[in-house]
Amino acid sequence: MRQILSIIAGLTTAYLIIVMAQMIKEGLYPTPMDLDFSDKSKVDAWFATLPSKAFLIIAISHALASFSAGFISSLVSGINRYIFGLISVSVIFVTVIIFLFTYNFPTWFVITDTVATAVLGFLGVILGGSRYTS
């Protein structure tokens, strides 16, 4: 039971980090009210107008979310720390990959976001799993 709760805690924390970063991005670079996300050409045109800082906010939020999910899940799980940390990181990583390949993002952003999410997630698992708690 503790292992499942560790995954839920890690994913909940990751979700909250991403939501807060999205709120920051929306405050700085708001989405047009008339934008229809089912029309990919309009979404791609809007992405082309966004500055690179907007994409960096998203990449940083994904990386921090992946780190926190791995860290918290591996820290709380008790046994098999690395396995449960990697499960949480994998959920975040697959979600990010689906997000990245749904729309036509700039190539630099796709590479940066993918690498940062994977590396920081793995680092979170290693750091959380190596902590000694009794």
Image (cartoon, rainbow, N blue to C red):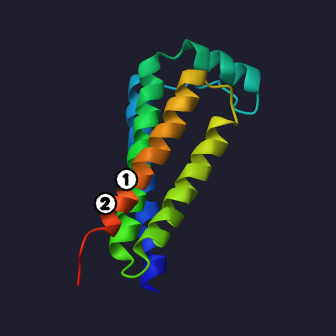
The amino acid on which the numbered mark 2 sits, given as a three-letter code, is: Leu
Disc 1 and disc 2 in contact, CB within 8 angstroms: yes
**Left or right placement of residue 47 versus residue 126 in this view:** right
Real-space Cα separation, disc 1 to disc 2, in angstroms: 6 Å
**Could you tell me if residue 32 is visible in this image?**
no
- The image position of residue 113, as x and y in percent, is 51, 35
**Left or right placement of residue 101 versus residue 93 in this view:** right
**What residue lies at 44% left-to-right and 78% top-to-bottom?**
80
**Could you tell me if residue 90 is visible in this image?**
yes
- Quadrant of residue 98 within the rendered picture: top right
**Left or right placement of residue 66 versus residue 87 in this view:** left
**What residue lies at 41% left-to-right and 60% top-to-bottom?**
70
Depth check: 123 or 53 in front? Answer: 123
The C terminus sits in image quarter: bottom left
- The image position of residue 83, as x and y in percent, is 49, 71
- The image position of residue 45, as x and y in percent, is 66, 15
- 64 over 73 or under it: above or below: above
> Residue 123: which disc?
1
Depth check: 133 or 104 in front? Answer: 133
- 47 over 86 or under it: above or below: above
**Left or right placement of residue 127 versus residue 31 in this view:** left
The amino acid on which the numbered mark 1 sits, given as a three-letter code, is: Leu
- Quadrant of residue 33 within the rendered picture: top right
**What residue lies at 68% left-to-right and 31% top-to-bottom?**
103
SS at badge 2: helix
Q: Residues within 10 Å of mark 1 (few under 14, many from 20)?
A: some
> Residue 127: which disc?
2
SS at badge 1: helix
**What residue lies at 60% left-to-right and 23% top-to-bottom?**
107
Depth check: 5 or 38 in front? Answer: 5
